[in-house]
Image (cartoon, rainbow, N blue to C red):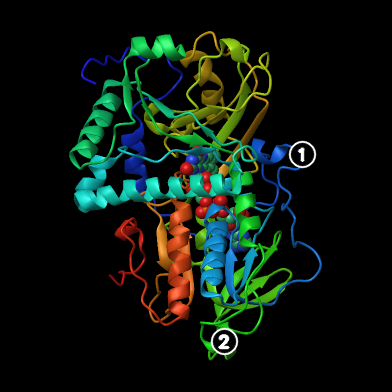
Amino acid sequence: MEDIIVPSAAHLPLSLDSLEGIDRILEKLSPSSAAPLPVSNPTVPIWSAAPDSNPLAREGSEGDFTTDADVCIIGSGISGISAAYHLSNLARQEKTSLKVVVLEGRDFCSGATGRNGGHLTPSLFNSFGHYVQMHGVNGARRTVELENQTVKDIIDLVDEGGWASDIELVEGGHTKLLFTKNELGCMRSDWKAAEAAGIDLSATQWLTNKEMDAKYGTPFPGIHMPGYNLWPLKLVTKLYQHAGRASTPSRFLPAFFTRPGPFSLTLHTHTPVTSVTAIPDAPEGRRWRLSTPRGDITTSYVLHATNAYASHLLPQMIGKIMPTRGQVIATRSSVPISDFKLTSSAWWANEGFEYFFPKLTKSADEHPLVVIGGGRESAAPGFEFNVADDSTVNDKVGHTLRSFLPCVFPGQFETGQEPELEWTGIMGFTKSMDPFVGPVPPVGDEKYAGAYICAGFSGHGMTRAFKCAQAVAEMIVADMRGEKWETPSWMPEWYLTTPSAS
Ligand SMILES: Cc1cc2nc3c(=O)[nH]c(=O)nc-3n(C[C@H](O)[C@H](O)[C@H](O)COP(=O)(O)OP(=O)(O)OC[C@H]3O[C@@H](n4cnc5c(N)ncnc54)[C@H](O)[C@@H]3O)c2cc1C
């Protein structure tokens, strides 16, 4: 690690060392108005452009509308559908009846999850020093534990279900490129802090610029670590289908949850929730009324898995979760797979602003298609914070994305080549970059009993949302049984919206 030299990156078409600037802006940002609903005409991401890639796109958007449920989940991204998946498992374990309804404003999984960069790489040491400072060594360890557990659980599930080829899962590791001495210094100190805390870093490998040049055809040094990429929409589709599989009759839960009948899961897409209101003295525990253009639905529990849009329905989240636009292009290499050098399955660069990976190729003469996102640093000073419209793109960001690969991997991409596809998606950023998980925080006397939130993954949700959603599903079931939920050892306690039971 000590031999690593960073060559000048001044020629790159990038703003370097922008992270500090972005952190300061994030700290100051406090939008005073609620997020809008997702726009109805979003750009088309590569994940849903392919025919038949979203079989659930319009599921339940027409015909009968469900008017009553035990649990309503708002949002069909990885958070909402993971929660449905965990609720289905819990209901089956308890052999209880549970009626779960998912309400989605647009196509199935058309939010950040359906438009993201496709990376599933746990953070083993990134920002570790910051977490130690904020939450102590044990807290910092929990952040790694959560991400490792999330990835392990997802991969186990994919293996059990035999889904790997359907969701194009690739385990090829993840390489982080280092462009400045400052970046190298931060990575070194985070890596050392994680090593000192006992994090297993044996699978990480520091690569000098000579090694990187020989292996990948780029003059910059890097760090290689374990990681995957996949087709996020297809993973979430599998999760939904798995959750909805055959079910069992009721037994253990209190009377109003144990009407006879199996676990059921219903999806209504193109059904935006426009308000959630408390029902005073609710019959049968139906505490919430969710209004939609198709009618109302009453429910005992409501989970806000609405990510960037959370404050549209929850005023207390205004300024807590900020819509932030990310942009991605899919661009083809100028060389066929036989001469292609980006053989690490996934990449990060420039303090994480840029992230990219080559999609799987089908034949030896195919020129690989690379999915690359980022470029927000070129949108300073706003960095695309408070932008909730994914129907348009930012030209400055697009320019950075188009210029990046030809400069960083000379000879592998043609300068000035137009991408095959360009799209945007809306992330939900929080000031701490960590999500809100648990009961919806009360406002004054309003207690929000039975309302939960799992949102605000700040551009890094694939390795956190599945387990955070598990925590919320367990909280809901514990509440149904009148039990206290115990914080698992993998959960960073500060993600929780209320102090935990343990
Ligand atoms: C461009 C981009 C690239 C990214 N790349 C990566 C990456 O490579 N790796 C990674 O780990 N993370 C990445 N992320 C972040 C990751 O995608 C998110 O953290 C994660 O998908 C969040 O999942 P979610 O289910 O919480 O939110 P979403 O997927 O946004 O789901 C929320 C859903 O709620 C729906 N909704 C909102 N309000 C309402 C309402 N009132 N009524 C009904 N429905 C509503 C939305 O339409 C949406 O479908 C990226 C994000 C973006 C935008």
Q: Is residue 306 left or right of 39 when viewed as pictured?
A: left
Depth check: give the residue in front, 180 or 135: 135
User: Residue type at mark 1?
Assistant: Pro
Locate the N terminus and report the quarter of the image it occupies.
top left
Mark 2 vs ligand 1: CB below 8 Å: no
Q: First in sequence: mark 2 or mark 1?
A: 1
- Residue 491 visible in the snapshot: yes
Query: Crowding at label 1, few (<14), some or many (≥20) Cα neighbours within 10 Å?
Result: few
| Labels 2 and 1 touching (C-beta < 8 A) | no
Mark 1 vs ligand 1: CB below 8 Å: no
Q: Quadrant of residue 440?
A: bottom left
Q: Position of residue 64 (x, y in %)?
A: 79, 71
State the residue position of label 1: 51
Residue at (40% x, 52% y) in the render: 430
Query: Crowding at label 2, few (<14), some or many (≥20) Cα neighbours within 10 Å?
Result: few
Q: Is residue 146 above or below residue 274?
A: above
Residue at (40% x, 25% y) in the render: 15
Q: Is residue 62 left or right of 411 when viewed as pictured?
A: right
- Label placed on residue 472: none
State the residue position of label 2: 256
Residue at (65% x, 20% y) in the render: 418
Element marked by disc 1: loop
User: Residue type at mark 2?
Assistant: Phe
Residue situated furthest right in the rendering: 63
